[in-house]
Amino acid sequence: MAEAAVAEGGMTRREFLYYIWGASMALFTAEAAGLLIYFAIPRFREGQFGGAFPVPVDLLPGVNAPPTNFPDGRFWLVNLDTSSGEGSERMSPASDESEPIVGVLAIYKVCTHLGCIYDWNGANERFECPCHGSKYRLDGRRIEDPAPRSLDRFRVEALDANQEVLATADTAVIADTTTYAPLVLPDGTATIRVDTGGRLDGPSQPLLCELRDSCP
Ligand code: FES
């Protein structure tokens, strides 16, 4: 009797609860849609560290040549082919590497020991870290420690002249570490896109100086 009276002048308690429930569901749906849109929008712009860096293919270094530095993206690009015989002073295979190492790698410019910025030493033909002396081969493999692993790698894609993706670097398991394999560029590659938001650890292979019996 009391509920009917309320219904004549306004809303019943049950109607009120329905409205509250409807409003809650609408709010929940709006929040979920907002989150979806938030995660769908790239957080980093092209050319900003954390985002993608397009590199014209003619800026690639030659086969086994010294690396090309991209300071804004905090990476080096290297172009490897240990079967070519070129640049063997920089990129010769080790005794535990039976397959040729071929393709393009984008290597993170931060030392895997304690995060210093290392550099390419052209006189010694290798990367060297000024902080504690870690050394790395052209492809980022550790030569001397204390670095706990080889240099980290970014995902690389090959694009044609219309910016269509021709190939993407595969992942490979090396010394129990899943990392990016060098990308062999297909014919028609015009641009290489380096995704600095897609980084994988470098592999924890044996030190090259141990294999060569040349550790200090
Ligand atoms: S930070 Fe590079 S060797 Fe320590």
Image (cartoon, rainbow, N blue to C red):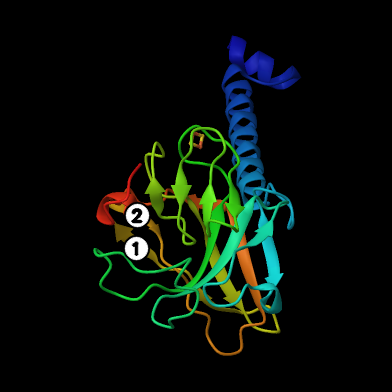
Tell me which corner region of the image, top left, top right, bottom left or bottom right, holds residue 59.
bottom right
Q: Which mark is residue 172?
A: 1
* Residue 174 % position (x, y): 30, 58
- Single out the residue that lies furthest toward the top: 2
Q: Quadrant of residue 91?
A: bottom left
First in sequence: mark 2 or mark 1? 1
The residue under the point 51% across, 41% down is 111
Q: Is residue 216 left or right of residue 160?
A: left
Of the residues shown, which amino acid type is indicated by label 2? Thr
Q: Is residue 208 found left or right of 137 in the rendered image?
A: left
> Which residue appears at 48% of the width and 78% of the height?
184
For residue 44, side relative to residue 172 (left or right): right
Residue 16, compared with residue 171, is above or below; it is: above
Residue at image mark 2: 178
Position of residue 55 measured from the top left corner of the image (x, y, whole percent): 69, 69
Helix, strand or loop at label 2? It is strand
Kindly tell me whether residue 175 is visible in this rendering. no
